[in-house]
Amino acid sequence: MLTVIVIIVLCLLAITGAPLFSVIAAGAVYGFYIADVNLEVIGIEIYRLAETPLLMALPLFTLAGYLLSESKISLRLLALIQASIGWMPGGFIIVSFAACAVFTALTGAAGVTIVALGALLYPALKKMEYSDKFTLGMITTTGSLGLLLAPSLPLILYGIVAQQMELENTFTLNELFIAGLIPSALMVIILSFYGVYKSRKYSIETVRYDSSELFKAIRQMRWELPLPILLLTGIYSGYFVISEAAALVVCYVLLVEVIINREVSTKKLMPIITESMTMIGSILLILAVSLALTNVFIDAELPDKIFEIISNNIESKYTFLLLLNIFLLFIGAILDIFSALVIIVPLILPVALSFGIHPVHLGIIFLANMQIGYMTPPVGINLFISSQRFNRPISEVYKASLPFMLILLIVLLMITYIPGISLFLIN
Amino acid sequence: MQIDESNKNKAINVIHFIEDSFIVLLIIGIVVIALSQIVLRNLFDDGIIWAESLVRVMVLWIAMTGAMIATRKGKHLKIDVLSHFSKKNDLKKIEKINNAFAFVVCLVIFYNSLRYVQTEFEYSVSAVGIIPSWIISMIIPIAFGVMSIRFFIYTIYKK
């Protein structure tokens, strides 16, 4: 009875905006307390941050992402898109989706795509006379496209959380990275089809192809272009360990943006580093207290109980997956992706495994849901970012992004029910 | 009175500066260590044995220092649904309750992690090279101590 009251109070506190770490930590402390465990254990649990391999990749990639979004890379990227494929009707749309996906992955999916790249694409699309609604919807969608591409932080975090659980059916980060490739491509391709189909209705002015413009744009990007190629081939081929790749990327980005391009002044360096480390600090803190809460759950055999309830009511794996999608979409709309990952994954991963779902497949499903959750009305965070950045009423953003969301939902169903899309490349 | 006030602000600024510099040094340290490991391994087929564990400890320190700074800047992750739909005045009252709650939680963790550090001290285990683990885990009570003070101040004074 007391436990029920505690849970209700904690949920209320969380929904009203109490710092999530304090709510999770309180849950863990309460759990240890009623299980008669010495509360010193909370120190041991937090210390586990220092015993988790791979974790160092998170602060490094975060820093690289913050540095990149502080430079003028988005301007140069836009120029390159225009010059390379602006001549093709609808070509701009296709490359924009692809560029946003790569940008989101590189900047760690921390929600900067709409502000950094979207803010430039918006006037460009308007100039090409795409309708307001289409433009707004498209930009809102691009905010979380690329979540499934390495080295996005949520992807790495899922790998870390899953590996913490000592499953029988383990996987490597590389397998997870590879699994994200086809689903990401699928989203970009299907969204592009819709975009191109839509653009036939408008009399889109295309830019005339000019090879000197293209060379100019490439020249301006010559230092940044090798980055995704190096990083992606390095990671996907398994040549670098992820943490090494992260350190190299930070160094390279520092070199290019601070010394060669001089777009990030040394004066701004300290605030950027502090800001990015504060952001990752708050994520790691939540990870630490969630690890403690997970142990409470496991000691209380909660995952087993959840599985029992679910398997008593649901027989087929497919019904389970459908309910899982609905649940995760809801979670994705109210919780930020990092908190959702560290709280929910330890609970559902064992259940999903007993239904015979591959942990890598579950990771892709989970993140794809979160991606859509970001733009699910009424509270998806991308909707608010767009509404604020482009000064539009939120209801207009809801309407504009709805068709794009429906498309992503279709892709989500494909990813969920055809495991091969995710697992084909790693088997 | 005025002198007191400006001295107080100065002291606070110094603390903030120490936190900021510390976290910057930590991440730069991680980059430098990771890169030298790559160079050592590939060129000299060598490596520093304790480098891996040192880097992991630095991640813990980044997490704790970052958490302190996040408290000061109000950057902790939270569910931000209410702020879009409710009045400012109601919001402030709720925020006070939430801060008071966070204060209590941080205090509990501060006390218990301090006891944990004490136990580590008594058993004097070394964690990285010759550095004893109680020094490394000291950052946990420090961080939660500082955070509890900050949440307390927010609960009482923030308008």
Image (cartoon, rainbow, N blue to C red):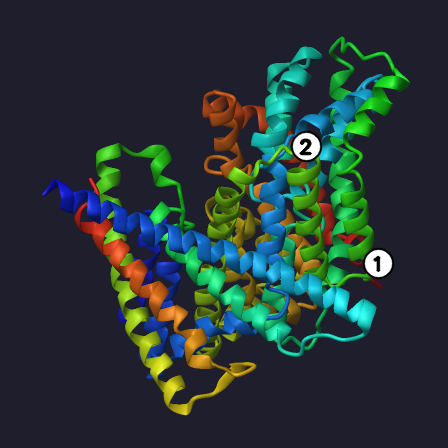
**Residue A9: x percent and y percent?**
29, 58
**Residue A60: x percent and y percent?**
61, 54
Q: Amino acid at mark 2?
A: Ile
* Quadrant housing the C terminus of chain A: bottom right
- Secondary structure found at label 1: helix
Q: CA distance from mark 1 to mark 2?
A: 26 Å
Residue found at x 88% / y 18%: A212
Residue in view at x 53 percent, y 75 percent: A304
The quadrant of the image that shows the N terminus of chain A is bottom left
Quarter of the image holding residue A22?
Answer: bottom left
Q: Front-most of A50 and B30?
A: B30
Q: Report in which chain the residue with disc 2 lies.
A: A
A65 up-or-down from A321: above or below? above
Q: Secondary structure at mark 2?
A: helix
Q: Is A419 above or below relative to A163? A: above
The residue at which mark 2 appears reads as A73
Locate residue A318: give its quadrant. Answer: bottom right
Residue occupying image coordinates x 82% and y 68%: B43
Q: Provide residue A284's location: percent of width, then percent of height.
A: 49, 60
Q: Amino acid at mark 1?
A: Ser
Where is residue B101? Give x, y as percent: 26, 58
Residue at the spot of label 1: A237
Q: Which residue occupies the extreme front position in the image? A: B3
In this view, the residue farthest toward the bottom is B123
Q: Are marks 1 and 2 on the same chain?
A: yes
